[in-house]
Amino acid sequence: MNILVLGAGQLARMMSLSATHLDLHVLAYDVGSKQVIDPVTFATKEFTLEQAITRSHAITAEFEHIPHDVLTLCAQSGKFYPGAQAIATGGDRAKEKALLDKAKVACAPYQLITEKGHFLNAIERLEMPLVVKTCQAGYDGKGQWRVKRQEDVEQIWSEMATFIASGTELAPHSIIAEKMIPFDREVSIIGVRDKQGQCKTYPLTENQHTNGVLTLSIAGKEKLAIEQQAQDAFNAIANALDYVGVLAIEFFDVQGTLLVNEIAPRVHNSGHWTQQGCHVSQFENHMRAVSGLPLGSTELIRPTAMINVLGQSSIPHSVLGVSDTTSHWYAKEAKPGRKMGHINVSGKDLKQLGERLDDLAAILPEHDYPGVKATADSLIGA
Ligand code: ATP
Ligand code: MG
């Protein structure tokens, strides 16, 4: 079977690598260069987008900000999963909040903003501090403002107004203000839904962000009650979207109660640990779901952590000398802060995982790989 992925980055690459052994053949459409390429070798294919759509059995996406015309073509083919509505919802925070309300899943109190009055109203009703986010653009914490003091309101409004004014009739821009949540930590659930509506979820993942970017994820240390909350939210959201494929939901954990931060209608960085922590990774399960194949196990085999490699063009080879550790490279040119690859490390239990993270912390400088040592210490001490 042939599968076309919209977007030609590391997620398409890892989908391809996870699918070849199932006899699934993945090509990617680079929306920037408008070329169809092999996402592993980057070789250009002599297909137009239309030809690639025709020869594909299923079409999917690795990101949500897909040009309108491309999305329409793919949706018209009847082979696009998770579907145009799911992609549009994940790419617009206002649509996302409406979905959460419809599915009755809790999130941070919010207010949509298209004019200054709404902003002033949000400050009064929700009270500062607020997190203000662009609805249509933004990733890795970009397109956000923190509103903490009355003195900052005018300056922030002028920046917000510029963003709103840059929208068009076809692609309007809006902004959302959320109450700043004093969360204890951030977690996410990755799950998959097949064409018959069956859902399976991976274990909850704890995520550490540094300057708005995910730096470390760890799976295998959660209690049943919180897992259940996340699973319930997953089922409600995936069913409301009649979703097919892998879906990620990020949450704030506020004293054991989960509030949704955002959803991503795709495989997700916080699910990269599944490549070594589960029999069937998020990438393979996404490929299975969109191709109509039976889903694979999402059970945890062993506690596993993922460390993002940001901006580094290589890692010391001794990393691979730590037991049950491997790396995944994205074959990208190094730029400061860019996601270049990740390291997965597993242990038979949390203590052993902690010891291995401690070994990695001795190799990887804290400055470039924040939180590895602290996570090791907390697992060893637990
Ligand atoms: P990504 O797509 O890379 O996950 P993003 O740019 O889409 O990030 P968010 O996930 O919405 O943005 O926000 C980035 C980070 O900012 C969150 O992981 C969280 O740490 C913080 N944050 C966002 N919203 C809130 C909020 N309402 N209260 C407190 N912190 C928040
Ligand atoms: Mg996020």
Image (tube, helix red, strand yellow):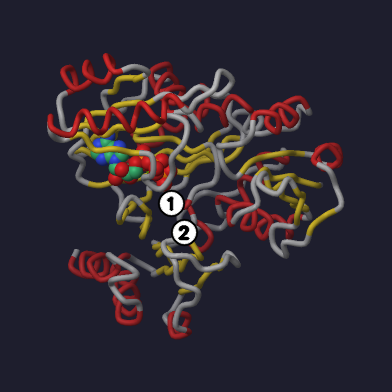
Closest to the observer, 368 or 379: 368
Within 10 Å of disc 2 (Cα), the crowding (few <14, some 14-19, many 20+) is many
Residue that badge 1 annotates: 270
Within 10 Å of disc 1 (Cα), the crowding (few <14, some 14-19, many 20+) is many
Q: Position of residue 382 (x, y in %)?
A: 19, 63
Callout 2: SS: loop
- The reply to whether residue 224 is in sight is no
Q: Which residue, as the protein is rendered here, is positioned at the far left?
A: 150
Q: Based on the displayed image, in which of its 4 quarters is residue 266 positioned?
A: top right
Residue 253 in the figure: left or right of residue 138: left
Closest to the observer, 379 or 302: 379
Against 235, residue 223 (above or below) is below
Callout 1: SS: helix
Against 73, residue 208 (above or below) is below
Residue that badge 2 annotates: 273
What amino acid is at disc 1? Ser
Q: Which residue is at 47% across, 28% downward?
A: 166
Q: Position of residue 108 (x, y in %)?
A: 27, 28
- The reply to whether residue 292 is in sight is yes
What amino acid is at disc 2? Trp
Kindly report the distance in space between the C-alpha atoms of the residues bearing marks 1 and 2. Answer: 7 Å
Mark 1 and mark 2 in contact? Answer it, CB < 8 Å. Answer: yes
Q: Position of residue 91 (x, y in %)?
A: 51, 32
* Front of the two marks 1 and 2: 1
